[in-house]
Image (cartoon, rainbow, N blue to C red):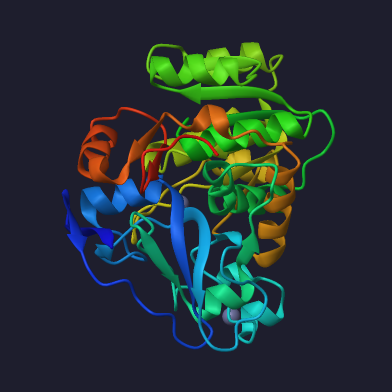
């Protein structure tokens, strides 16, 4: 089998290795589609605290090729979709229903989806290996993990009817938040830099766009939000400067979701008047819980969230090096990587 391995920043090699045999509880998938993601690009550029160098790619869907001993909920030939991690179910956070903070979350992480085959660990196979909904393609199903993360944030921010939501940063995650906001009936202001993204988000239904490089951002937000600021601001850039600015774009009583993480040790300072006297709440959101995965699954299967416009292109595994070089140059939102020359199915 072929497998893409990230050896060091900006060095991917497509190696050939034996197809692994699943051990007890494990499931071997024949990969049908994998997606590139911001985490992969971050790892490609400079490494990542949670994702080691080695086989990479973690958003995928495929067919069960073989199962290890004791696996009974899926069988050979089933079309399935895993998420890369699963909680242990036993630690303190897990027992409090905060499985996204599981102490053993990243044990048994499933990496290596840019490949012909992928071995799903016992931990993930037992909890987060779901049947692919018949109604959607493998490519769409592979959005399960990023959408689960987005759903977690929406659970934390407790949406109210007819809110005004600003989404800052228009990568795949920002665009999923825009889709989610529209699905929740919100009025959406999309904020980004790149012309293609601003055009894309307008096509996805954003009610107003802000060009953060060329517009008077604060003035434009005031105009678009009727002078008061937004009920919700969702930060998806991962830039400390934008974290600091974000509460300034919220209305009094508004909520700011800091979705994109910053490097370890980063410190940011907020305007205390906004936070205290205007009760602008700061909400953080990290990863996902099993119930977020279930909700994301339903939204994908029902077509409520149509992810197809987020896929920039469908590429073969052999072009993985070029795909990442292209993403690194800032081209494209998300690519689907397929072991064979196919398109949507
Ligand atoms: Zn991802
Ligand atoms: Zn746990």
Is residue 287 left or right of 228 when viewed as pictured? left
Quadrant for the N terminus in the image = bottom left
> At 55% across and 54% down in the image, what residue appears?
145
- Where residue 199 sits in the image (x, y, percent)? 49, 14
Task: Please give left or right for residue 99 compared with residue 47 in the image.
Answer: right
Q: Position of residue 220 (x, y in %)?
A: 55, 13
- Name which residue lies at 46% across and 13% down: 216
Q: Residue furthest front?
A: 77
Q: Residue at x 62, y 31 (%)?
A: 178
Horizontal and vertical percent position of residue 287: 55, 59
Q: Is residue 313 above or below residue 112?
A: above
Displayed quadrant of residue 302: top right
Quadrant of residue 219 within the rendered picture: top right
Say which of 214 and 126 sits in front: 126
- The percent coordinates of residue 9 (x first, y second) are 17, 53
Task: Give the total of numbered labels.
Answer: 0
From what the image shows, is residue 183 above or below residue 4? above
Q: Nearer the viewer, residue 75 or 302?
A: 75
Q: State whether residue 89 appears in this view.
A: yes
* Extreme residue toward the right, this view: 161
| Front residue (pair 143, 116) | 116
């Amino acid at each position: 089998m072929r497998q893409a391995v990230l050896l060091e920043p900006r060095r991917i090699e497509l190696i050939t290795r034996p197809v692994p045999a699943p051990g007890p509880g494990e499931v071997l998938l024949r990969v049908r589609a994998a997606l590139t993601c911001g985490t992969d690009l971050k790892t490609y550029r400079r490494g990542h605290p949670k994702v080691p160098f080695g086989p990479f790619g973690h958003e995928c869907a495929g067919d069960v090729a073989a199962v290890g001993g004791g696996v009974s909920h899926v069988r050979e030939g089933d079309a399935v979709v895993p998420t890369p991690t699963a909680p242990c179910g036993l630690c303190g956070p897990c027992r409090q229903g905060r499985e996204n903070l599981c102490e053993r979350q990243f044990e048994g992480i499933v990496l290596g989806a840019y490949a012909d085959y992928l071995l799903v660990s016992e931990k993930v196979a037992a909890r987060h290996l779901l049947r692919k909904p018949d109604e959607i393609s493998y490519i769409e199903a592979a959005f399960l993990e990023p959408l689960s993360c987005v759903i977690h944030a929406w659970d934390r921010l407790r949406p109210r009817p007819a809110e005004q939501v600003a989404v800052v940063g228009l990568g795949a995650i920002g665009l999923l938040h825009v889709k989610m906001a529209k699905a929740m009936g919100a009025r959406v202001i999309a904020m980004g830099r790149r012309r293609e993204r601003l055009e894309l988000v307008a096509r996805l239904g954003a009610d107003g766009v802000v060009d953060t490089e060329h517009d008077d951002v604060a003035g434009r937000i005031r105009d678009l939000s009727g002078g008061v600021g937004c009920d919700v601001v969702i930060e998806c850039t991962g830039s400390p400067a934008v974290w600091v600015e974000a509460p300034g774009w919220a209305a009094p009583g508004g909520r700011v979701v800091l979705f994109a993480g910053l490097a370890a040790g980063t410190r940011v300072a907020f305007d205390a008047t906004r936070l205290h006297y205007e009760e602008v709440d700061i909400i953080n959101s990290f990863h996902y819980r099993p119930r977020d995965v279930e909700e994301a699954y339903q939204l994908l299967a029902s077509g409520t969230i149509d992810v197809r416009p987020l896929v920039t292109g469908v590429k073969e595994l052999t072009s993985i090096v070029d795909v990442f070089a292209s993403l690194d140059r800032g081209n494209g939102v998300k690519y689907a990587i397929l072991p064979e020359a196919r398109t949507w199915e």
